[in-house]
Amino acid sequence: MNSIELNILLPALIAGLLVLATHIPLGMKVLERGVIFADLAVAQIAGLGVIIAALLDLTGQPLLVQLIAATSALCGAALLAWIEKRLPEVKEACIGLTFVLAASGGILLMSHDVHSGERLKDLLVGQILWVSNTQLIATALLTAVLLTLWQWSKLKTHYLGFYALFALAVTASVQLVGVYLVFASLIVPALATYRITAHRMVYAFAIGISGYAAGLLLSAWFDLPSGATVVWALAICGVGVMLWKRL
């Protein structure tokens, strides 16, 4: 591997580690609460905010883009919190419908955009190989704040508080790695370790780190799309740990 590839893969791996830092504990809570599609819905709503910012020609003002995306995600979080509290028996159906509406809304907004295909691909698959130092620093600061609130506040035990933390974490990560990797980072480590009681967090992070590292290396060696490769690598690592623990 040459130095050019290393200079690209290392920031991408750091981006993956930052995503895992918040998404693994969030994913375990999502699995516990039975709101599996909440991450997809919030990620898609945050992406809708990014699309709106792009259509308003605000891409040159990253702080304003972040503000619009975060506001969209927080509005979505408030809606999901209301659904979970008021409609618990059909919450998954309502959350799934919210995702479909947000995704369809994004397609409608981009219907007259000549770059719509590229924007949609970036939103779903992400551009993890091209993350900037500015993005990494901003995400690292946000990650530190969110982990502090997660550990030392009672927000995660409240309907709206949990979804607010969730929305802010997803807003940052969806622009780093895309919707598919956000979902995989949340669900795969949590799902693969749901029967593990001792050192569950250690196994979850081992799956996440191994998946990102292997996926990025494979994508570089075989010239494959990085986001999709990491998703498959995460899944394979998760299945591997499940089989190993069972045997």
Image (tube, rainbow, N blue to C red):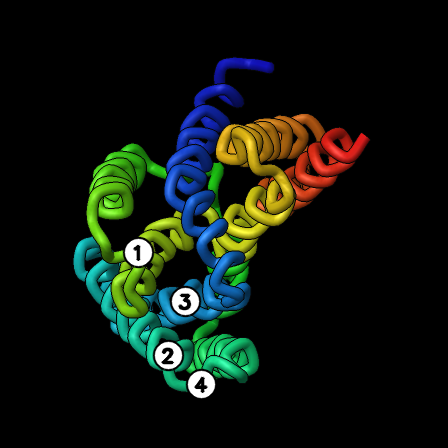
Name the quarter where the N terminus is drawn.
Answer: top right
The Cα–Cα distance between marks 1 and 4, rounded to whole angstroms, is: 20 Å
Q: Quadrant of residue 121?
A: bottom right
Q: Position of residue 120 (x, y in %)?
A: 51, 65
Label located before the other in sequence (1 or 4): 4
Q: Which mark is residue 42?
A: 3
Using the numbered discs, state the Cα–Cα distance from disc 2 to disc 1 in whole angstroms: 15 Å
Give the residue number, with chain letter if any, for mark 4: 87
Q: Mark 1: which secondary structure? A: helix
Q: Amino acid at mark 2?
A: Lys
Q: Provide the secondary structure element on which disc 3 rests.
A: helix
Q: Earlier in the sequence, mark 2 or mark 3?
A: 3
Residue 62 falls in image quadrant? bottom left
Residue type pointed to by label 4: Leu
Residue in view at x 44 percent, y 39 percent: 20
Cα–Cα span, label 2 and label 3 = 17 Å
- Which residue is identified by label 1? 156
